[in-house]
Amino acid sequence: GEKAASEKKPAEKAPSKKKPAEKKPAEQKTSQKEGGEKKKKVRKHHASRNPVLARGIGRYSRSAMYARKALYKRKYTAPETKIEKKKKEKPRATITKPVGGDKNGGSRVVKIRKMPRYYPTEDVPRKLLSHGKKPFCQHKRRLRASITPGTVLILLTGRHRGKRVVFLKQLATGLLLVTGPLVINRVPLRRAHQKFVIATSTKVDISGVKIPKHLTDAYFKKKKLRKPKHQEGEIFDTEKEKYELTEQRKSDQKAVDSQILARIKQVPQLRGYLRSTFCLSNGVYPHKLVF
Amino acid sequence: VFKRFVEIGRVAFISFGPHAGKLVAIVDVIDQNRALVDGPCSGVRRQAMPFKCMQLTDFVLKFPHSARQKCVRLAWEKENINEKWAATRWAKKIEAREKKAKMTDFDRYKVMKAKKMRNRIIKHEMKKLQKMSSKKGKKPEKSEKVKKAQK
């Protein structure tokens, strides 16, 4: 019995000895793993170390909490950036300059960045009269939410008044680039003003249409010939009054329209709709119409 | 002279007010001007409502006066008032009016084209019949009968 027991013990001990021996490297590995994982993972936050006496009142003061939370060893600084490293090289503050004259001592030490010679009595300097007044090129352009690429617009002014037209995009000056298409209602690629246009809720899908990039405001702007060499009498003759169609306009029109016409054909009756003009008749009130 | 009466169970259409356009059943009469009204299937809570804003319909439900909402709902669903109402000319006219008001510019164009086509077809048939009647002067009665049938 005892021998068996004693035999058993060393037998048990031997394997048990082995096991811890085996376990240790395994444990170390796991503990290392866990430690590593812990370092990567966010450590579990400790509950508040400041027991509550009443609502809003803690047991310990600010300084006691500082010690309790061991913030003295938890001071972090942001990592030094390369810019900061570069900035450590301070620029020169003074410079010595040679000075002429006999008895002047040859050189002076001069500050490079000097103190201001005048401090104004007001902290905030007076604003210029032109404050906040921007030139036209810097104005904010807005576009009504109802006008999106592909919307059918009704032109209200100009020689194409009443015609229904497809909207392409808004140009840099805020004017809308619009096209008939030409074959449908004889409206070419043209600019229209947002304010003089009714946006209908009918939209054509223009998602894949590529509008050439050279169609800008400068392309559409009216050209003025001015040669001040002439003196009064002949000026009015030389200025271009008639608009002349150029080949470039024709080719651009074709390029854009061919893409759009395909989309228009897919919607039934849209072609006829674009061909028609808008008009009011008896009993039709624009404020009651849903466009 | 009067065909529709205010009675318990009469279904009424609310013409103005916050519940405009909904159907309610008259549950009880409060006084000369107001009724206790309930519209469980049309989203109107049980409340007092003046007669002025109610327009009586042809439908009458059967439930005792001051019946609770559950009974009103049962009677309403048994009679299938919602479907019957949608089938009436009254409701269809209302719907048509709403649709017309919502018409967009494109819709108006399509309607105009459809009307034009329809009128053209009708005119064409009329002209045919007129020609027939003028040619065959012997049978003016027949063409009149056909004209009446066309209308």
Image: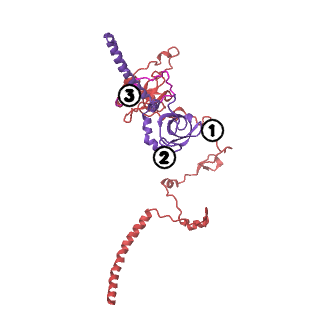
Q: Colour of chain A?
A: red
> What residue type is disc 2 on?
Lys
Circles 2, 1 touching at the beta carbon (< 8 Å): no
Q: Is A9 on the left-hand or right-hand side of A140?
A: left
In the image, which disc is placed on residue A127? 1
Instruction: Check disc 3 and report the residue beneath it.
Output: A270
A51, A254: nearer the viewer = A51
Which residues lie in the magenta part? A265-291
Do discs 3 and 1 belong to a common subunit?
yes
> What residue type is disc 3 on?
Leu
What's the coloring here? by chain
Q: Which secondary structure is most common in the magenta stretch? A: loop
Task: Select label 3 or label 1 by which is in front.
Answer: 3
Instruction: Check disc 2 and report the residue beneath it.
Output: B70
Locate residue A195, reporting x and y percent: 51, 29
A256, B37: nearer the viewer = B37
Helix, strand or loop at mark 1:
loop
Task: Select label 2 or label 1 by which is in front.
Answer: 2
Question: Is disc 1 surrounded by few (<14), some (14 to 19) or many (20+) residues within 10 Å?
Answer: few
